Image (cartoon, rainbow, N blue to C red):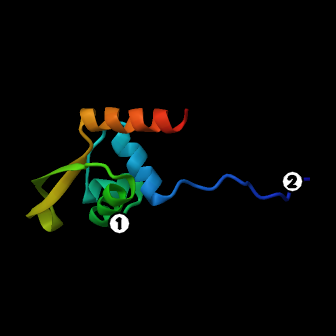
Amino acid sequence: MQDSKQSTVSPMSKNERVFKALMSGRSFNRFEAEHQLADHCLPSTIATLERKHHITISRKYETVRGYMGSPTKCCRYWIEPEEIKRIEEIKCELNG
């Protein structure tokens, strides 16, 4: 007989997934984030993370293959190593 109790572990939120991925040193554009992180509106998520956590997320425009191979401009987002270090130091201070 299976246990009918539901798991108390909640899946990671979209904001948590994106923040964790960026903190690991990875970078994403909106198309990569949709496929890899299930984030359909990365620019809004980035703005929310910056505002909520008081962090700086770097960005630059790039051109990628879009519909039918035509060039499409989008933004690539990442957190610089120095900023990752600063964020980790703050987290350590907060955790004691």
Q: Position of residue 35 (x, y in %)?
A: 36, 56
- Residue that appears at 10% across and 53% down: 62
Q: Position of residue 44 (x, y in %)?
A: 31, 66
From this viewpoint, which residue is outermost toward the right?
1
- Identify residue for label 2: 3
Q: Residue at x 17, y 51 (%)?
A: 59
- Give the crowd class for mark 1: few <14, some 14-19, many >=20 residues within 10 Å: some
Dot 2 lies on which element? loop
**Which x, y percent locates residue 74?**
15, 60
Position of residue 45 in the picture relative to residue 1 (left or right): left
Identify the residue at horizontal 23%, vertical 50% (top origin): 77
In the image, 90 versus 23, the foreground residue is 90
Q: Amino acid at mark 1?
A: His
**In this rendering, would 39 be left or right of 78?**
right
Q: Position of residue 39 (x, y in %)?
A: 38, 61
Mark 1 lies on a secondary structure that is: loop
Res. 40 mark: 1
Distance from disc 1 to disc 2, alpha carbons, whole Å, reads 35 Å
- Can you tell which quarter of the image residue 79 is in? top left
Asked where in the image residue 65 lies, by quadrant, the reply is: bottom left
Q: Are marks 1 and 2 in contact (CB under 8 Å)?
A: no
Q: Amino acid at mark 2?
A: Asp
